[in-house]
Amino acid sequence: MLKVSILPSLLAADMGRLADGARLAEWAEADALHVDIMDGHFVPNLSMGPATVAMFRREATIPLSVHLMLDNPEHYLDRFIEAGSTRLLIHVEVSCDLHTALKAIRMRGVVPGLTLNPDTPANTLVPYLADIGEVLCMTVHPGYGGQAFIPSVLPKIRQIREMAIQCGYPNLDIMVDGGIDIDTATQCASQGANAFVAGTSLYRVPDMKAAIRTMRDAVRHAGGEWGLDHG
């Protein structure tokens, strides 16, 4: 069975009350917090750094999924691991030695993952399947929150799930991020995704706990083909 995970994206929280945003996600029984790190080069925006991740680690006990949108992620791995990352994602499109970077993350006891931009094909992952614990499929172009979901990514999610099964990695976590609400989450679950990063649709509702519970039940039902379960 694949564990369903719902991750509120702190990029959508009130930037003046980020600690409250972290505590809210934990109260709402989220599976983890998702933290976007942007350098203004790999993506056209700036966001948080290791000190902010360390603050989230102090304020909440649930896992931290940290997504590095950086040109040279290999230079920052230790800092984000020491700050408290539980899972650390780097982009397959960067020019660093990905095998070495992913192995360095795993050696520190952190789950390594690779992120694919919407236009990056699924087969780009093949050389790295043995090195990773999860894949993040961006369903918007990274850099800004609040964008519209790109439905053309849906077939790629299925390709990755089928490829992972064929290559002997049936339990690979496939996460989606970008324009995720209950409707788009269920579409992604039907294609094989089992982890869902949601920003606006969770931080802009009166009751995040109820929204997470509803999304979790909906994606579990939609992903029945793949054996999605609460875990």
Image (spheres, helix red, strand yellow):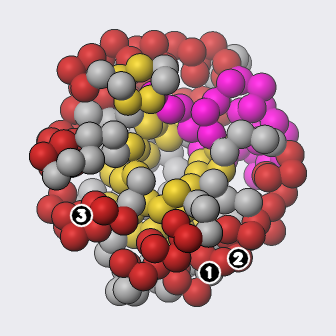
Q: Quick one: label 2 or label 3, which is nearer the N terminus?
A: 2
Mark number, residue 79 = 2
Distance Cα–Cα, label 1 vs label 2:
5 Å
Query: Is residue 12 visible to us here?
Result: no
Whether label 1 touches label 2, CB < 8 Å? yes
Query: Is residue 100 visible to us here?
Result: yes
Q: Amino acid at mark 1?
A: Tyr
Whether label 2 touches label 3, CB < 8 Å? no
Apparent side of residue 225 relative to residue 99 in the rendered image (left or right): left
Mark 3 = which residue? 125
Residues 98 and 206: in front is 98
Vertical arrangement, residue 116 with respect to residue 58, above or below? below
Mark number, residue 199 = none
The magenta stretch is: 4-32
Q: Residue at x 27, y 17 (%)?
A: 224
Q: Residue at x 48, y 20 (%)?
A: 230
Apparent side of residue 33 relative to residue 169 in the rendered image (left or right): right
Whether label 3 touches label 1, CB < 8 Å? no
Distance Cα–Cα, label 2 vs label 3:
25 Å
Around disc 3, counting alpha carbons within 10 Å, would you say few (fewer than 14), some (14 to 19), or many (20 or more)?
some
Mark number, residue 76 = 1
Does residue 213 belong to the magenta stretch? Answer: no
Q: Amino acid at mark 3?
A: Leu
